[in-house]
Image (cartoon, helix red, strand yellow):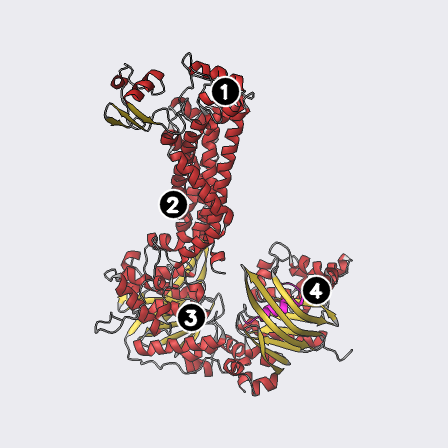
Amino acid sequence: MTDAPLLDVRDLSVAFRQGGRETRAVDQVSFSVARGKTLALVGESGSGKSISALSIVRLLPPGAQVSGEARFDGRNMLTVDDATLRSVRGARITMVFQEPMTSLNPLQTIERQIAEILELHGLSDANARRSRVVELLTEVGIPNPSARLGAYPHQLSGGQRQRVMIAMALANKPDLLIADEPTTALDVTVQAQILALLERLQQTYGMAMLFITHDLGLVRRFADTVCVMQKGKVIETGEVETVFSAPRHPYTRALLSAEPKGDPIVSDDAAPVVVSADNLRVWFPIKAGFMRRTVDHVKAVDGVSLIIREGATVGVVGESGSGKTTLALALLRLIRSEGPIVFLGDRIDGKSVAEMRPLRRDMQIVFQDPYGSLSPRMSVAEIVAEGLTVQRPELTLNERREIVAQALTETGLDPATMDRYPHEFSGGQRQRIAIARAIVLEPKFVVLDEPTSALDMSVQAQIIDLLRDLQRRRALAYLFISHDLRVVKALAAHLIVMRHGKVVEEGPATQVFDHPQQEYTRALFAAAFRNQVESLS
Amino acid sequence: MDVITHGAAPLAPPISRSGWLQLTPLDRRRLVNFKANRRGYLSFWLFTILFVMSLLSNILANDRPILAWYKGELLFPAFVNYPEEKFGGFLARTDYRDPVIESEINTHGWMVWPPVHFSYDTHNLALPTPAPSPPTWMLSKSQCEIAAAKTLRPGQTNHGCADIEWNWLGTDDQGRDVVARLLYGFRISVLFGLILATISSIVGVAAGAVQGFFGGRVDLVLQRFIEIWSSLPQLYLLIIISSFLTPGFFVLLGILLLFSWVSLVHVVRAEFLRARNFEYVNAARALGLSNFRIITRHLLPNATVATLTFLPFILNSSITTLTSLDFLGFGLPPGSPSLGEILLQGKSNLQAPWLGLTGFIIIALMLSLLVFIGEAVRDAFDPRKNFG
């Protein structure tokens, strides 16, 4: 082994040309990865970290203009011929992507997909291939691997799919594994398992890893060196310890301090109840047979009771599929449910769509994805004013615009931009627009369905501050749904932990956080806080 | 958050909409995108010119003058039917091409003729050759002289082709001018196509929207109905129906409409099924919007790109259906100008290639232009091009 780094990237630039305009996605980036070591590329979305990694194996879409050099084991990957490139891809450099659902072919069994790579890179004996596939699946921790060989991706859970992806990446014992946000799409408990797996495999195989993430906790735990990227440039690079203990660049400092902070507003137990539900159930029937008889139910929400008081926040945490969002939609009467719901002293569970309409003014929702929740074909003013046109039809156009402008100001946006379209705003600004849409009607109760999950870390903190500020000023009642416990901790004074539609544990947030009673809650917290605790210590 | 009343400066910027169309910025960008597509933009203007010309058929090609001054009276023969009595004759309908009437009016006034002196049903009585007669510029000098001799009074000098009425694209087998028939035929085809495409799009989009938005049983029932309905053999039905209903413009429109609305339903339904679970649609529900408003404000715009992609083909298929029916002889009543009828004449008179060629070229040109325009419009509305 030589001292030369395994991967040496020098002055890498990537530009995209579209309609005569040139956008520089990556600008003069240099980094290197030593054998057996881990380099983390950190930055917010759009900072060019994925594009840098993809350009090393020339996987960029046509139209990208790449310059500079990326030497892998001495050869410049940007200029080698296609045959050499193919022999390196999938064998010596492999990749694991963010979304395990779309990176696997849904029409082929996992055995075929893993075996295909082995076959392409020279393992021609079918029996040898099969035993190697079983070996790999055992290694990545798929239970009972020989029975799962014929499974299709949809028969596996998200974590298992990501394990299969990792098995594919490991198939040919690569020298370099590029992991592009490998855990972002997974639940916290699964995240922890996948990370442990990667860590163990790295030690066994002695491979180098290029780890792309926006999560600083992971970097701290995982990487040897770190490159912080912003707007296509590397702004800080160095040993993880040095960068974390003494960040030089202001942006790095901002990133490190961007964790959601602050304490939730302590609720007053005497405050009037805004929403309460008792033994709320949402069961989706499973129908079978010729007569479509109901044979069973999917119990998305199964007997949940809660009380939300004015000015208080109830946090709902749990893994995906635990029924958090369904619970919220049921409380807002956006889906059918059983069990009494009392809103501002009124039973609303029996009301018709038309009877509900005037009440919608007092109950609003903010969704997770600020890209999906704003119609791309309406201007911001139209989006925010839409509720006003229904709920307060007596207003004139100019009065409506004035109210919209005030709501935008209140959420920290410049009202002069109200005639622009959503795509002209960043993710954080778009989430502010969504919040403005919810508060413009002056509601009493707002459901926040993972409002920060799709946002970058530094923006998350700002949105949390904004939400807390609005709550204080308007005595709003929040139902805050999240799988991110750090965010919940900063906002919710009362906590409900859900699993499989049932409440596992509930109580004052401080108590649940400090002394979780249930095994599941402890596992959830352990997975979520391990990174954070380490990075803060 | 009530409206500020104490005289503070308003926060909201004034509404900025510019241009005489009051376009929003998004529409302006679409217009720019459309203009940037050179082929589509050129096609648009070319088609508009052709269409406007065909709309003006009555004053471009007519066997009656546009204006006439007769005995101190201003007449509009192209638009008003004056009995021949007025000019000293006895027929109910004046034939202004009759030399007697012509000289009668010219001695007591004047006439302004359209550029082409034939209407779609005017028989050229002074054909140089037996019908179908070739375009005048293809005739030999002697053929012209024979034709000119028929109209000239004895003693006048025969200038050959300069003395006869020109049939720029020849005549059909009944001696009717092809240019005139083409203009009127183009008008009928395009209007028919536009009306059929518009109505069937409206019906199709509405049906698809209902299916996609409500889903469930409504979707199931309508979907099965459409499957059965669209598997009916259209052409046979058309032929059978046209045998006991007199096929006119509106009868044909009605019959074709029965089947053509189906084509858009699937696309719109699929778009609605996809979009009805978008978060912004859920947000709109949470704001208390009615189903109708959600459909029109939030879901229909999503279906526009898909609809616009199909629209040029629907328009074209409407035009070709009419053309093929005319070609088969089940279309518009005999004598009506139509592109299909020109093609039919071309087929039955292979010795007269100008008929078939004219029909082919004009139909190919019209269909291509429409597809080019459709493509440009679709690209202009494509959100991926707008929000790059």
**Magenta residues (range):** A47-60
Under mark 3, the amino acid is Gln
- Quadrant of the drawing holding the C terminus of chain A: bottom right
Distance between the alpha carbons at the discs numbered 4 and 1: 72 Å
- Residue depicted at x 38% and y 62%: A379
- Residue depicted at x 50% and y 78%: A525
Question: Mark 2 sits on what residue?
Answer: B206
Distance between the alpha carbons at the discs numbered 3 and 2: 36 Å
The disc, 4 or 3, on the residue closer to the chain's N-terminal end is: 4
Distance between the alpha carbons at the discs numbered 3 and 1: 73 Å
The reply to whether label 3 and label 2 mark residues of one chain is no
- Quadrant of the drawing holding the N terminus of chain A: bottom right
Q: Residues within 10 Å of mark 1 (few under 14, many from 20)?
A: many
Q: Nearer the viewer, mark 4 or mark 3?
A: 3
Q: Nearer the viewer, mark 1 or mark 2?
A: 1
* Image disc number at residue B133: 1
Q: Are marks 3 and 1 in contact (CB under 8 Å)?
A: no
Q: Is mark 3 on a helix, strand or loop?
A: helix
Locate residue A80 relative to residue A520 in the image: left or right.
right
Under mark 1, the amino acid is Ser
Q: Do the residues labelled 3 and 2 touch (CB within 8 Å)?
A: no
